[in-house]
Image (spheres, rainbow, N blue to C red):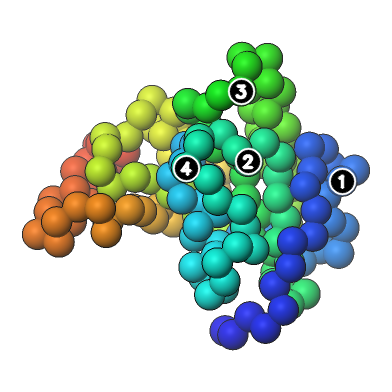
Amino acid sequence: MLIKNPKFEISAVGPKQYPNNHLPEIVLVGKSNVGKSSFINTMINRKKLARTSSEPGKTRQINFYNMDDSFYFVDLPGYGYSKMSKKEQEQVGKFIEYYLFNRKEIALIVFLVDIRHNPTQNDKLMYNYMISSGLPCLILANKADKIAKTKVDDAVHSLQKQLNPLR
């Protein structure tokens, strides 16, 4: 699919701010600085639609990107390390949780993990949520360009074992 007119639509912290045109939503989740915004830019072949930063925790609201009025990419704030206060982290966690548990338009969850690192406890919690939610989901091992090509297969296998040890 060729996206001709992608646009940022809105940043939201609650359901009254979510778009209400019932388009399917592809939701990006993962820890801070894993590359969720960069993923959006790469998928639509743009450099700066979704803002990126080397500083973890820059995305602090739920960002909706409209893809030719066909679907949304939804960029959630990352979890884990950021320069937000504990109170801000709690507030962000609550509106993310509300969105994930209640939004009917979610068509797919894309869970980005950093291939270079072992999954954190928060990564494992997110994985378990996705599996138990029954929503379609996929795991994307990101930042593979940062390791030797000969180590990619082993790193992916290790991630699979750690996130899903019983399957």
Q: Could you give the CA–CA distance between mark 3 and mark 4, rounded to whole angstroms?
A: 15 Å
| Tag 4 residue | 54
Badge 2, how many Cα within 10 Å: few under 14, some, many 20+? Answer: many
> Amino acid under label 3?
Met
Query: Element under label 3?
Result: loop
The residue beneath circle 2 is 59
Give the alpha-carbon distance from disc 1 to disc 3, as whole Å.
22 Å
Residue 51 appears anywhere in the view: yes
At label 4, counting other C-alpha atoms closer than 10 Å, the crowd grade (few under 14, some 14-19, many 20 or more) is: few
Residue located beneath label 3 in the image: 84
**Residue drawn 65% across the image and 54% down it:** 74
Specify the amino acid type for callout 2: Thr
Viewer-nearest residue: 132 or 84: 84
Name the amino acid, label 4: Ser
Q: Quadrant of the N terminus?
A: bottom right
Question: Given contact means CB atoms under 8 Å apart, are the residues at marks 1 and 4 in contact?
Answer: no
Report the front residue among 89 and 85.
Answer: 85
Judged by depth in the image, the label closer to the viewer, 1 or 3, is 3
Q: How far apart in space, not on screen, are marks 2 and 4 (Cα)?
A: 11 Å
* Callout 4 secondary element: loop
Residue 70 at x, y percent in the picture:
72, 75
Of circles 1 and 2, the one toward us is 2
Say which label, 3 or 2, has the lower sequence index. Answer: 2
Image quadrant where residue 124 sits: top left
In the picture of the structure, the residue carrying the numbered disc 1 is 17
Contact flag, marks 1 and 2 (Cβ < 8 Å):
no
